[in-house]
Amino acid sequence: MIDIKNVDFSYSRNAKLLSGLSLKLETGRIHGLLGKNGEGKSTLLKLISGLVFPIHGNIDVMGFNPQKRTPEMLQDIFFLPEELPQLPLSIKNYEEVYAPFYPNFSAEQFNSYLKEFEIDDKKAMLNKLSHGQKKKVFVSFGLATNTKLLLMDEPTNGLDIPSKGQFRRMVASAVDESRCLIISTHQVRDLDSLIDSIMIMDEHEIVFNEPNENITKKLLFKVVDHNETDESVIYSEESMRGLYQVRENTTGEESKLDIELLFNAVFTDKKRIMNLFN
Amino acid sequence: MNTTFSFNRLGLLIKRYFAENKQRELSFWGIVIVVFMLMHDITAIGMFFYISGFIFAARMFKIFSYTPGGMHYLLIPATHLEKLVTAILLSTVYFFIMLLVSYSIGNTLGTTLGNLIFNMQNPVSLDLFQLESISKVWGTRVISQRSLISIFLNFALIQSIFLLGSVYFKKNAIGRTFLTIIFFTILIGLLEILILRVTFGSFSITGQNMNLYISGDNLFPGFEQAGKIVKYLMIPFFWVVAYFRLTEKQV
């Protein structure tokens, strides 16, 4: 679905934001894009959607060059940015104006998502809604477009606690084998159960890109009572419950993936993790 | 699916514009009608046509000054050509027609109300539609021929420049386009002086004012017509440049 080869990108001449970035993503997965601030996560989403152009390298999205921004490509992409546009339209008008651009849009789905988010008044003006409410409308609309590619930049920012759960349920039900969802986020705890493939950006490149099943095959996430250290420990972290550890999975034991621990482990010993997966 | 141009998508883009600017459009044209009710001087009306027109054109791509808005606009599934044609139709054809309609309504209402209030019998005179205007220059009667088409073409030329400015400049499109026009005018003026020096050798200015005018007709027959054609060809030229600028736009 997405094939990025050796992409360089910078906003200014002096500082390169992305350098030689390569990435392949397949359909049927919810990819979590993680990284520290300023690593270029949002820029990567913009490159995929054709909002910015690479200086060098190639990007292929569903067989299209995103730089051309053709309607065939755009009608199969929905991008939910972190900051939403201020549109002087009611929810109903927004649907009337923008839904016809997306041939697979389902009004039924849109209404059911709005209902799940407890947004009843479709006459409400988008520019009068709170950030969280507006985000719910755009998430609902984005899922209802049934585009093959969904890009979401910090989708849970601004959502209240019950809405985060609703968001997870809705996204999980909306993504099937034909769709691909990329979520850029810092709120890993919010999306822990949703993401099934993890990409980590460091020093302006993708240093880790693995599906969850591969991660738990090779890494073991454990809580131990005391400082059990041996060579298999890659990362450990003190907490109230004990000592959280990420170890090499040498025994084939099954464990629950902890994205935050994985993220910290990658930053602690990137080389070891990269060797382990390569 | 038509990948270059679809009238369906064009219609959707126009619908989008009116849905998002309904309130602004209604209040703007209301104000314009009131202005035309009060304004009767044909020169001032002409100025109002052009000034309001270029302000409107320069705001066509104002959405790019606000990043989330620009992102949202660029991701609308329509071609760049359809987006540009929408902007041209709105800023040039729609705006011109609306100005003429508002002028006719405003002028008629203004004259009728004036007659009712002051008990007069003034006829409604839509001077803008007079194809011949008579004015006095230095005491001499000057009859100038004009047509709505030539007014429209001049209007379209100004609109095309400001439309390009609107795509080109992210912020303060009106001011920056003005500065660019001034810059190019000075540049062309200097080039003209240089050509005159090269062609006719040195010349000196002896009076306080110098009005140097070379009539094209005196040099080559049909030169003036050719100049007009070149001038009007600038309209599609600016549109084409605006198109390429839009395709290169990054947010």
Image (cartoon, rainbow, N blue to C red):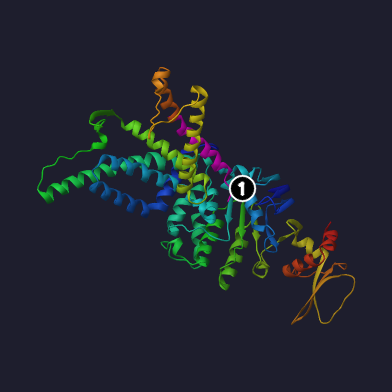
Above or below, B144 against A138 in this view is above
- Disc 1 is placed on an element classified as loop
Assign the magenta stretch its main secondary structure. Answer: helix
Residue A17 found in image quarter: bottom right
Name the residue: 46% across, 42% down.
B163
Residue A62 found in image quarter: top right
Left or right, B149 with respect to B175, comes to left
Residue B85 x/y as whole percent: 46, 39
Residue A220 x/y as whole percent: 81, 69
* Badge 1 amino acid: Gly
Q: Would you say residue A116 is visible in this rendering?
A: no
Q: Which residue is mark 1?
A: A50
Tell me the quadrant of the picture where the N terminus of chain B can be found: top right
Pick whichever, A211 or B201, lies toward us.
Answer: B201
**Boundaries of the magenta span:** B232-251
Name the residue: 67% across, 54% down.
A44
Pick whichever, A90 or B105, lies toward us.
Answer: B105
Callout 1: residue from which chain?
A
Q: Is residue B121 shown in magenta?
A: no
Left or right, B125 with respect to A277, comes to left
Residue B196 x/y as whole percent: 48, 26
Q: Residue furthest right?
A: A231
Q: Residue furthest top?
A: B221
Q: Residue furthest left?
A: B119
Determine crowd level at label 1: few under 14, some 14-19, many 20+ residues with C-alpha closer than 10 A. Answer: many
Q: Would you say residue B50 is visible in this rendering?
A: yes
Left or right, A275 with respect to A136, comes to right
Q: Is residue B241 shown in magenta?
A: yes
Left or right, A228 with respect to A18, comes to right
Residue A169 x/y as whole percent: 60, 65
Number of callouts: 1
Pick whichever, A106 or A43, lies toward us.
Answer: A43
